[in-house]
Amino acid sequence: MTPLKTVGHATHRIDALQRVTGAAKYTSDIHLPGMLYARVLRSPHPHARIRKIDVSKAMALPGVNAILTHENCDVTWGSGDQLNQRRLFNNPVRFAGDPVAAIAAVDRHVAEDATHLIEVDYEILPFLTDVEEALKPGAVAIHEGGNLSLNNQRQPVPQTYKRGNVADGLKAADHVFEDNFTSAHHNNAQLEIRVSIAEWSGDKLTVHAATQGIANCRTDIARDLKINVDNVRVISEYMGGGFGNKNQCQDSDLMAAMLAKQAGAPVKLEFTRKEDFVAVHGRWSSRQSYKVGVKNDGTLTAIQMTALTGAGAYRKGSCDLSGTEIYQVPHLETSVSPVYTNTAVAANYRAPAYPQAVFGIESLMDDVAYALKMDPMEFRLKNMTRKFRDQTPYTSIGLEDCIRKGAEKFEWKKRWKPEPGSGAGPVKRGAGMAMGMFGSGLGRSSAVVRLDGQGQYHVHVGVTDVGTAAKTTMGLIAAEELGVPLEKVTVVWGDTDTCPYSVGESGSRTTVQTGMAVIEAVRDLKKQIAEKGSPKGNDVLTAMATTNPPPLQGLSRNSFVAHFAEVEVNIETGHVVVTRFVAAHDSGRVVNPLTAQSQVQGGSIQGIGMALHEELLYDKRSGQPLNAGYYGARIMTHLDAPLVDVVWVETDEPYGPFGAKTLGEPTIIPTVAAVANAVYNAIGRRVKSLPITRDKILGVLA
Amino acid sequence: MKKISRRKFVEGTSAGIVAVAAIPAVEAQQKPTPAAAAAAVNPSVPRTTIKLTVNGVDHRLEVEDRWTLVELLRDHLELTGTKIGCDRGECGACTVLVDGTPLYSCSQLAVWMNGRSIQTVEGLAKSGKLDPLQEAFIEHDAPQCGYCTSGQLMIAKALLMKNARPTRDEVRTAMTGNLCRCSNYNHYVEAVMAAGGKA
């Protein structure tokens, strides 16, 4: 790969100064004159019908300006549910935390006080917290049509994929393995809590939103409030993380807008941390059952997976599972059924369908390798994907290099022990690995590049930068294509009034999608400069480009990854410490090695938390969430975090901007499985349910 | 006509000099804030007048007894660099220094700050020059989304004031009450190690 001038060199974020001085204005930092503060009253019951709601005492409290309930606010939150009509305030309420009312008052204390003065008469309904119980005959239906949700084509059947014939594949096998794995609902838990500020000026609405995509947020708001999209402006200048739970528009955006309308004043609505855990969303849980056929020499003949996933009370996400695609196998069948329960809603969280599914398949493949007396790494090299779904060649694939170079850096041959559970003393050491992949590049994005009379280039892109350094990436790509230093490029972002459409920072597609639009716009601008000369004084030259995913001519574009973990497990206490971690990534050319390393280290460490700690627990008898918040979730801390060594496998990718592929989400995909496999290698027993907590480790050792 | 003595004139002048130093506090007091509006509608909420120093500036303020320190900083002194991540003492995003000691400002009442000196992220840079920690945070790409960064800076500042050259494990231990969901812990520790001895 030819080295480039700007792209590929470690570069500080263009907004780093603002981030380290407190000058960066996040949504919650914005104060508008006359602004009111809002709070939400939520259902304490997991399932109930509201017979009567009386807001008169709350409304009479001095300082209260507006109150919304299902009686005076009939707004459908379109992106809150893909299949059912989900309103801002639903009756019946379907989980403990479903919004019942929203109040705007002169300050947060008065708003909070007012929530206690609203009187709600609930008719308590039967409820469900367990996906298997939800499918039993006679179970209470949470939505019309029952608790088995529709597939992504809105049919009342599971989401399925099939190639070959699994029965034939299993017949051809020398050995058949069967096992079950489960994973828990856990939370995105980004540091910035959900917040929206809405202000009306006549029929024009401005929403300051903490969003991953200003453009889609804007069109969603216009659709849900039934107003012209030209009358909506969305601003998100700095954004404190989302990992998938701030895509599109949020109910808080719509509630703030409706409250502001009723009150005739700007309204800031902030959720609490507890609300963020129980009432926004987390990753869907899963129950996976597998059958795998394999020959004596370790060649796979068939994989079958059937699974239930936990959608929670509404169908906000795909609730799909993706993991089996990392293996080459002639006969494959998968079937996934999302199920409703009266619990927190599940939707996108960093590689939504992957890490829990990869935990299942990679745990089982580990067992297969051990049973055949094969090194799990060799087993993967033998059976890893070579064509997408065994049919479509990849645009570039560095998976084998990820495994080999990662293993070398990790010292796999030295650290992995052929006899799992061996070793003296109560602290057992073990090593595990897993692999993953992620498709990239859906959606459409635009970019505008402007050259002013002073020789400065302005790149307008509809990104918000969720923490990935997307602004800097866009600047680097523009500077490289222009052949100018980064200082000559000003990036304009985060405001629908000044930025063109971008698909939004989800699906790890900003670099490949919006980045391509930047390149196309720069090319057009350069052509204009060649024809007309550089602008002088008050003149400007402007170019715009819109790119769709490139025609891949029968190829599949994917990023690849292999993770390696070493753990120490104390078999007396069940305590696990990750002592070494290597993450090897093929994301094509790395645009900014400094910020890319942050993403890989961060994604890996986040995944270790998913493997070992995180679960939103429910009390089955009351339907109440038990551990909402950071203490209960036990997300990773400074002391938990190992050093993550990053290995780049930079394949020569022909399609992305300067050969870049997707990066953000693959960073968490195989982490969980690598840790789980290391725990197995350490103690010689397998924990088949996420998270791998101390009690489960002591349980399998007992 | 009342005669003004020389002594009174001098006293008045020096009082004037004192008042110049206190101008930011006077402004903070006189600025119409949402709190003032709340007081107008709800006089029953107990209020107390406190004096405190924030980033070297003296303030005399009437606060509601239920306000937390982070609320005072963010909503009433316009110092929004300090963030609220949980508002319940779990995440550390609101960490500030109170008389040099790092505290979660969501878990301190504003009225307790009478006579105390507070340092926030806005007070780290001195006369336009960044603190070595801020320089190192930029250099090592410590902030990803940046929402926990102010808290990470303040806890690191407290550590380096006590222990100028900490080990890696001392950094991790000191900072473990400050969560980063982007989980950029490796780069945070690297940055603090690099700033060690300079801050």
Image (cartoon, coloured by chain):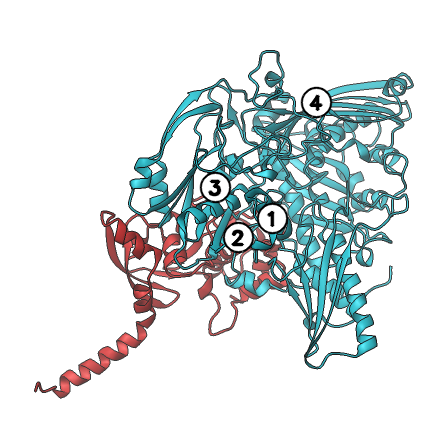
Q: Mark 1 and mark 3: span between their CA atoms?
A: 22 Å
Q: The red chain is which one?
A: B
Name chain A's colour: cyan
Nearer to us in this view, A669 or A49: A49
Would you name the residue on which mark 2 appears?
Answer: A207
Q: Mark 4 lies on which chain?
A: A
Q: Mark 3 and mark 4: span between their CA atoms?
A: 36 Å
Q: Say whether disc 2 or disc 3 marks the residue closer to the N-terminus.
A: 2
Would you name the residue on which mark 3 appears?
Answer: A273
Q: Mark 1 lies on which chain?
A: A
Task: Find the residue positioned furthest to the left.
Answer: B1
Same chain, marks 2 and 1?
A: yes
Nearer to us in this view, A258 or B55: A258
Residue beneath the point at 75% across and 61% down = A518
Q: What numbered label is drawn on residue B133? A: none
Q: As shown in the figure, which amino acid type bears the numbered disc 2? A: Val
Q: Say whether disc 2 or disc 1 marks the residue closer to the N-terminus.
A: 2
Q: Where is residue A19 in the image (x, y as percent from the top left)?
A: 55, 60
Q: Mark 1 and mark 4: span between their CA atoms?
A: 29 Å
